[in-house]
Image (cartoon, rainbow, N blue to C red):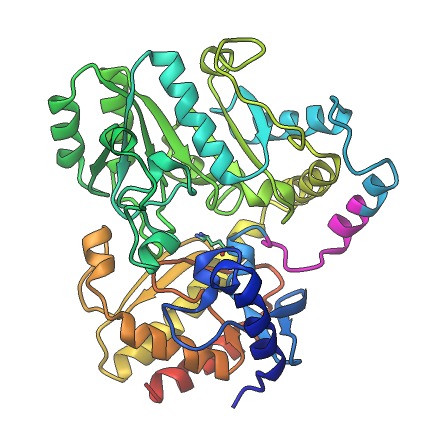
Amino acid sequence: MLQRTQSQELFQRAQKVIPGGVNSPVRAFKAVGGDPLFIKSAVGAYMTDQDGNQFIDLINSWGPMILGHAQKDIESAIGEAMKRSLSFGAPAQAEVEMAELITSMVPSIEKVRMVNSGTEATMSAIRLARGFTGKNKIIKFEGCYHGHGDSFLIAAGSGALTMGTPNSPGVTEGVAADTLIATFNDIASVKSLTNANEGQIAALIIEPVAGNMGCVPPQAGFLQDLRDLCDQENIVLIFDEVMTGFRLALGGAQEIYGVSADITTLGKIIGGGLPVGAYGGKEEIMDFVSPEGPVYQAGTLSGNPLAMAAGITMLSLLQTQPDTYQTLGKLTETIAVAIQEDLKSLGMGYTINRVGSMMSLFFTSEQVVDFKGASSCSTDTFSRYFQNMLKHGVYLPPSQYESWFVSTAITKDIAEKIIYASRLSLQSL
Ligand code: HOZ
């Protein structure tokens, strides 16, 4: 049994002053039962909660802690930057260095604008696409999540799906009417929307590897088909790489699948864990952003010096250690294959989806290629598995509809611990 006294006390206090006691819905553990654990610290592969329980972390702040927690170089870069003030609200060298790094690593990004979160990045990207094309509607995919901007809270994944509110109240009918919903991995569903809304679609936004209905990879040719259709219909193709950017490869999912976006949105990882986002793409489109162009977007904390220092260090470390991705991919594969063997020997129905260091286990014998597949698996079984894993010292994302993220701090020995914890967890389901 986990000792939870301190976490429970904090949760009682939190519920009196914070809606639901948490600052982001998935963290409330509503999908998996029980009360949330409050985290006190994290170092390397491990998180420690208020009661002193230690867990191997497979959330890794939903992606960015790719090098593990409290990475020394990132911490000292933040320390150095702190001495030069926490915020200027004026241009600084680090912002130029960051933009140079991003544009050198992601070929489709010729110019980039820094913001403060992935949500800001996606909101700004669709405004830009609308300003650039003079059209209003956007296409998104059922089960994909692009932050909590109004336009995206229609058939949304992640916490919206977990909480049963994929279409959030508070989003006006007008906004909802401008968001068209297609089926992931189904080009015919996209074509029927473009046919029915000819000349009206400004942008198509997609997580090239979906991470917010669990991990769901694109099928062969799907992203290229989207690219071709967008070119044909003069639609801005936006890849939301907030999770996949710099996690799957230096050039993100677009490098792996060989398909370029017109605009790419980035987040989390480019701040080394600090609150950062960015959107960037073709120069002719980015030059529509104010003050170069007429599409307005601004922010005092955009390009914040601490976030830039952390992000530059993170990206430079990844650039100088290119084998990181291969190592992470192999390690994640080892974990996935071992879990799969255990599921097989127990005769349980399962699907494991994995791309690089992102993976999800679905309790279903059907393939999971879209939202329908993801939502038809057994979330009850996942919840029990989650709780068992927690008891055995592994902290998974507290929802079926999230991806697991592996960090380089997870050594082979720690991977063995995850596999063993999973074996015990499956056996006692
Ligand atoms: N929606 C985020 C992951 N897809 C979770 C954010 C959080 O709770 O930190």
Task: Tell me what residue is drawn at x 35 percent, y 74 percent.
Answer: 383
Specify whether 323 is left or right of 230: right
Task: Tell me what residue is drawn at x 41 percent, y 22 percent.
Answer: 127
Q: Position of residue 267 (x, y in %)?
A: 54, 40
Task: Tell me what residue is drawn at x 84 percent, y 36 percent.
Answer: 85
Occupied quadrant, residue 175: top left
Residue extent of the magenta highlight? 65-78
Task: Tell me what residue is drawn at x 76 percent, y 34 percent.
Answer: 87
Looking at the rendering, in which quadrant would you find the C terminus? bottom left
Specify whether 359 is left or right of 93: left
Q: Position of residue 60 (x, y in %)?
A: 55, 59
In this view, the residue farthest toward the right is: 83
Nearest the eye: 10 or 417:
10
Q: Is 70 within the magenta? A: yes
Residue 278 visible to the viewer: yes
In this view, the residue farthest toward the front is: 16
Occupied quadrant, residue 176: top left
Nearest the eye: 194 or 255:
194
Q: Is 327 within the magenta? A: no
Q: Position of residue 241 (x, y in %)?
A: 45, 39
Q: Is residue 354 above or below residue 361?
A: above
Residue 251 visible to the viewer: no
Q: Position of residue 414 (x, y in %)?
A: 57, 74
Specify whether 60 is left or right of 94: left
Q: Is residue 81 above or below residue 403?
A: above
